[in-house]
Image (cartoon, rainbow, N blue to C red):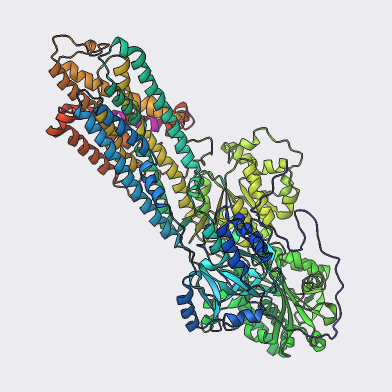
Amino acid sequence: MAEPEDKTRIRWDDGIVDVEAGVSNRQTDRSSGGLQRTRSHGSMSIRSIHSNTGGAIDPSAALPIQYRTISIDIDDYNRKADVAKKAQKAAATDLADLEWHTLPRDDVIGRLTTSLDQGLSQDQVKRRSVEYGKNTPSPPETHRFMQFMGYFFKGFGSILLIGSILVFVAWKPLGQPPAPANLALAIVLLAVFFIQAAFNMWQDWSSSRVMASIKNMIPEECHLIRDGVQVSTMAADVVPGDILLIKAGNKLPADVRFLQVSSDAKFDRSILTGESVPLAATVDCTDKNYLETKNIGLQGTHCSFGTCTGVVVATGNRTVFGRIAKLTNEPKKGLTPLEREVLNFVYVICSIMFVMIVLVVVLWAAWLRTTYPDWISVPNLIVACVSVAVAFIPEGLPVALTASLTISANMMRKNKVLCKSLKTVETLGSVSVICSDKTGTLTENKMIVTDCAFGLQIMSVDNVRDIAIADHVAGGDFASNAVDQLRTVAGLCNAGEFDAATKNLPLALRKIHGDATDQAILRFSESLGSVAELKSCWATKFNLAFNSKNKFMIRVLGFTHPDGLSLALPSGTAAIFEHGDMLLTMKGAPEILLERCTNYTGTSGVAMPLTAEARAKINKIKDDWSAQGRRVILLAHKAVSKTAFRSSPSSSSFEKEVLDQAQTGLTLVGLVAIVDPPRPEIPEVVKTLRAAGIRIFMVTGDFALTAQAIARECGIITNPNSIVADVTALSRDQPVPKNSKERDHTPSNESEADTIPSSIVLTGSDLITLTDHQWDALVSSYNEVVFARTTPEQKLRIVRELQARGHVVGMTGDGVNDAPALRAADIGIAIGGGSDIAVEAADMVLLESFSSVVEAVRFGRVLFDNLKKTIAYLLPAGSFSEFWPIMTNVAFGLPQILSSFLMIIICCFTDCLAATALAYEAPEADVLLRPPRKVGVDRLVDWKLIVQSYGFVGVFETVVSFAMSYWYLERNGIPFHVLWFSFGKLPESIDAGFYAQKLNEASSIYFVTLVVIQWFNLLAVRTRRLSIFQHPPLFNKATRNYYLFPAILFALVMAFFWLYIPSLQTVLGTAEVPVEYWFLPMSFGLGILLLDEARKFVVRKYPKGVVARVAW
């Protein structure tokens, strides 16, 4: 079934062959013309920049709608039509009055008092910074009242408040006489209501502070021309009149009028318009509507292709983005998966609570009220119902949830990881496949040219210059300009640009604006001779930037000084090269460009026919270098007569003519081998993630042999080359098991892993031919996969095919070509130094190292683990053990052995702090040894957790607490049999006052027993499978949790406070507890701990046994 069109997907429409569709919209090749005279046109130099703008506004879903509405309003205004909304009309009127797009280019520069070559001066920047302010949007309007009310009523605040009001009513006017204990209970509930609100305020402030510090980690940087030199500055410091340099991948920091654009320059406006097809950029106005014209670049949009130079015309709130943001309310944030899990749990608990309350009320109304009218009064019934409600609700859970999220955010910050949303942290715990780009992600993105080949000979970079000079002097084979031709193409067909501020530094330390490949080749060219000298001899007439679909770059040059001819061309060609003729230079993938070459530059510097033997030798050089993990770039040129071009370089049709000329007749000048070493931490990261049940797939645009070699260095491929499979291993006719889509992420046992070839390398052309059966076989049978020579569309398809087979996919990347897959993945992971569009598309940004993803996965899993532990701790005493005293009181006529007031103390005081302390638990040692959590299957609260909390710990604590209390009464002359079904009718031998006093003491004993046993339960739930000796709370820096012991001490202090102060005893009906009833529960608590240790031992010893299968 066809998939619906993805509206967020970036379309790549550049007139080149669509390998997915197998369709080309090229015209037939034109024959290259001979060298003849033609008129020369002026040049336009496009400079390359690198921008790292990361902290832009997160646009709301309403932005495209608002954008389109205002655009329509502008058209209406221009036709003098009415608009519907006053606010939108005002914004539309303001935008309709703008004329930056209709003015001639020189007029725009003049109005802004700037210069295309010099930019603004520092004095101008200072004055305009004062006049226009920072280039930042105004903070969104906050609804303080709603936020303030949320502090009180989110979570269980409303239930606490309603419970407090009901108990106040039970005290007065219903209480006859009013019971002081009910007043105290109502006051405590109200106090807890305000304490919870105060804690929510503090947590909100703490979390917002953490997130603010995280967002500030990504610098908002862009490249400008100021005082005649390129400078890097923060986007917030951009002012109107600044000359902005833009290249593919950059996000515009302000509204810009384009002054110069490359022929392939296109902008993705989907963030504003919702339309995913990139729009071409122009210098001239194409529409009177400011929002629709193509010569204006709007803040927040991305450059998808090409390079541009523009002048900033609006900043801050004056930009279109800023104006629309004023009209658009902040989007309502939906529930995240984890919040839904918690909400589902709360629904279950509240449903049980309501059922129990209804059961109590029905028993009272249908039976007790008539049969035993004096047993439970209406005030006591209200208090009992409130007690049931408070008992079943885990008041500590919202606090623990908020604390867990804050802790996770702090840990991400410490590990230099930016998470854009809560969903990111949650999703990390369930990622089963990570598809990683190679360059800049797995590798250092610090490329160096190590070898070059020209004249069919291989030379190292260290020796090429010395050997060439020596042979030139000696009249040897290199007594030519072969090296000069190589360095000319390397230096001129290059989007890199040396930073003027570092020109006096050694070559290795000089800063270059441009991508890593251009940087490496530009340094190589500079090492052979001055690139500035080359640029002084040649002027750029046309530029087609490299992109991942073409896999080549074109730059057409016209000479401006005769010395350039002897450097760039063989002597024979240079002799007939005239003014108006052009030099077409190309660099790119050898498998794309080699077939277009008909000649190669020999060692003598003369073009020689590219025979089949020469092609075979070049291919061998390429394959040998690729097998060593090197990126191979082919450099070529072609002298083109001026008569071969019918249009001028400034016309739109010139690009097609250039592409036609580039189809054939090229001269191969040389090959260069570039090394981009893997990051040193990558092998260990891959090993760790693989142990965590996460498969790492490499998805790269590099040649297959290069990708396979780098994958081996990174540990992604571990098998020898002889058993690494290719597409032929995927049978087109092989039947797929019915449950293939539900298979585990890895082979189920060792024998299966031994028989299945686990490594495979596929190319982009292979992906086009794969059937669903082959995809099923690939996903289910191979855990070491490399996808080479992939296009952006193919990367996107890989992500979707994996998702369709039940995988939670993480995608890492840093380039423009990675953005569609980053956006489509369950969690997109961008590298901090990557392109702006990749950072924008991703859900998480690694600011320093790829190794941070391990910590991110670890804490994504820990977040889920610790919430399970919190719930496992709260349920036994906080709901189960508190409910049964009320039920036995209603159903069996027994006294309520635990007072309602002490129930509230357990829920809101003694257990609450300990539950929060569990949120600070360190990751268990095996957290990265377990398979990923299956979304929708592994629930936060499942039957296993319920069995553990209610069936094991809850029953144990309830039975022990009942036994301790009734044993105490038995020892004091009140046997259990006289209380069973007594409904308050006691033998005459038992004094009522004595009975009331002993009942208070028994209630306090029940309370103390629960408090003490919960201390040991707290230590038990810290781990799910590991022993307390393997994960000690003290003395081990990796596992310690010092917050546990203040929480235990707080519970002890609370117990003494409510039980041992005489004035409170009288009001609350509490009493001192004999000392033995403090120590006896400790033995039972130790028993719980030992029983749980035994359970964990069996789980570790027999991981596939019955106990392990039911373990929570």
Q: Residue 941 at what x, y percent from top left?
A: 45, 33
Q: Nearer the viewer, residue 582 or 450?
A: 582
Tell me if 741 is positioned left or right of 23 in this view. left
Q: Residue 1055 at what x, y percent from top left?
A: 21, 34
Q: Quadrant of residue 808?
A: top right
Which SS type dominates the magenta stretch?
helix
Decide: is 411 above or below 670. above
Q: Nearer the viewer, residue 316 or 611?
A: 316
Q: Quadrant of residue 269?
A: bottom right
Asked whether 74 falls inside the magenta stretch, the response is: no
Q: Quadrant of residue 92?
A: bottom right
> Which image quadrant: the C terminus?
top left
Q: Nearer the viewer, residue 13 or 171?
A: 171
> Which image quadrant: the N terminus?
top right
Tell me if 746 is positioned left or right of 130 in this view. right
Where are the magenta residues, as a range? 1087-1097
Q: Residue 322 at what x, y percent from top left?
A: 53, 63
Asked whether 1094 falls inside the magenta stretch, the response is: yes
Q: Residue 260 at what x, y percent from top left?
A: 66, 76
Residue under the image location 15 percent in, 22 percent down: 997
Q: Is residue 165 visible?
A: yes
Tell me if 626 is positioned left or right of 928 in this view. right
Tell me if 892 is positioned left or right of 525 in this view. left
